[in-house]
Image (spheres, helix red, strand yellow):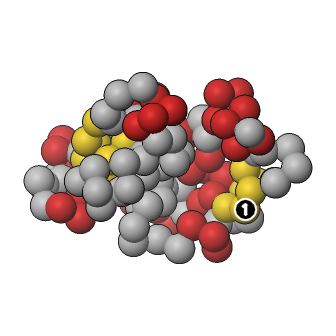
């Protein structure tokens, strides 16, 4: 899993080096919502992203509105999110992108600081 995600969080991109340790394994679709141990349901994630995501899985209503977490390997993230290279923060291009950024706190100060360096 570590190599599949290049030793970085699939959600925010923080590397093991930046985190100071190995990351965790997140179930993209949580067990409580019918998720499995299949490789395509596992995401290498930093502790913060794993905590923020927790057991989130969209309801049918949320899904109809595009309110879901983007899968780091299965979704084209560039359709939903862009990076503001000068300021270091992420910009939502779609409602799905905005939801993803907000739920995972992807513009938290530590990440913005890492993207500027």
**Residue 9 occupies quadrant:** top left
- Residue ID at (32%, 47%): 44
Q: Which residue is mark 1?
A: 82
Which residue is more in the foreground, 48 or 61? Answer: 48
* Secondary structure of the residue carrying numbered label 1: strand
- Residue ID at (18%, 41%): 32
Q: Is residue 57 visible?
A: no
- Residue ID at (33%, 35%): 23
Locate residue 74 relative to residue 34 in the image: left or right: right
- Residue ID at (63%, 58%): 97
Locate residue 38 relative to residue 26 in the image: left or right: left
Q: Where in the figure is residue 35, as x and y percent of width and height?
A: 18, 53
Locate residue 114 relative to residue 116 in the image: left or right: left
Which residue is more in the foreground, 36 or 18? Answer: 18
Name the outermost residue toward the left.
37
Q: Where in the figure is residue 50, as x and y percent of width and height?
A: 38, 35
């Amino acid at each position: 899993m570590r190599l599949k995600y290049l030793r970085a969080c699939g959600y925010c991109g923080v590397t093991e080096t930046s985190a100071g340790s190995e990351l965790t394994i997140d179930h993209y679709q949580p067990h409580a919502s019918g998720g499995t141990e299949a490789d395509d349901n596992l995401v290498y994630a930093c502790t913060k992203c794993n905590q923020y995501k927790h057991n989130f899985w969209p309801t049918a209503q949320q899904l109809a509105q595009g309110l879901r977490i983007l899968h780091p390997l299965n979704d084209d993230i560039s359709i939903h999110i862009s990076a503001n290279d000068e300021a270091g923060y992420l910009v939502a291009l779609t409602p799905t992108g905005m939801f993803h950024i907000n739920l995972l706190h992807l513009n938290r100060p530590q990440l913005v600081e890492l993207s500027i360096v």
